Image: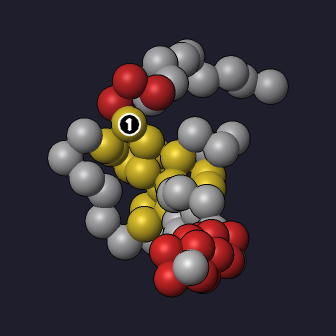
Amino acid sequence: MTQLLLLIVALLALGHLPPGRSEFKRCWKGQGACRTYCTRQETYMHMCPDASLCCLAYGTRPLASKPEYV
């Protein structure tokens, strides 16, 4: 009976936790995360609206393209 009660309490607590990686705001079409510092496996592309860095993994970094003149 005690184990069942503990299981119910644990499931209720987990139901209120946000899904993984939601503690950071998303940027760069959902592929990056706004953080104060980027990890070693990441680089920043631009600044987020809240003045933090938009960190992207090196594998998802877009290739540099030629500037388009209008």
Percent across and percent down for residue 13 are 60, 79
Q: Position of residue 26 (x, y in %)?
A: 62, 56
Q: Tell which residue pokes out farthest to the right in this image.
A: 70
Q: Position of residue 56 (x, y in %)?
A: 43, 42
**Near-viewer residue (59 or 7):** 7
- Asked whether residue 49 appears in the rendered view, the answer is no
Tell me the kind of residue under disc 1: Ala
In the rendered structure, the answer to whether residue 65 lies left or right of residue 8 reads left
Residue drawn at 44 percent across, 29 percent down = 61
Q: Residues within 10 Å of mark 1 (few under 14, many from 20)?
A: some
State the quadrant of the N terminus: bottom right
Q: Quadrant of the C terminus?
A: top right
Q: Is residue 6 left or right of residue 8?
A: left
Judging depth in this view, the residue of 5 and 62 nearest the camera is: 5
Residue displayed at 31% across by 56% down: 38
Asked where in the image residue 31 lies, by quadrant, the reply is top right
Residue at 19% across, 47% down: 40
Image coords of residue 58 (percent x, y): 34, 30
Task: Pick whichever, 19 or 51, lies toward us.
Answer: 19
The residue indicated by pointer 1 is: 57
Q: Is residue 20 above or below residue 2?
A: above
Query: In this view of the protein, can residue 28 be seen by the observer?
Result: yes
In the figure, 58 relative to 56: above or below?
Answer: above
Colouring rule applied to residues: secondary structure
Frontmost residue, 51 versus 56: 56
41 lies above or below 44: above
In this figure, what is the number of numbered marks?
1
Q: Element at badge 1?
A: strand
55 displayed left or right of 21: left
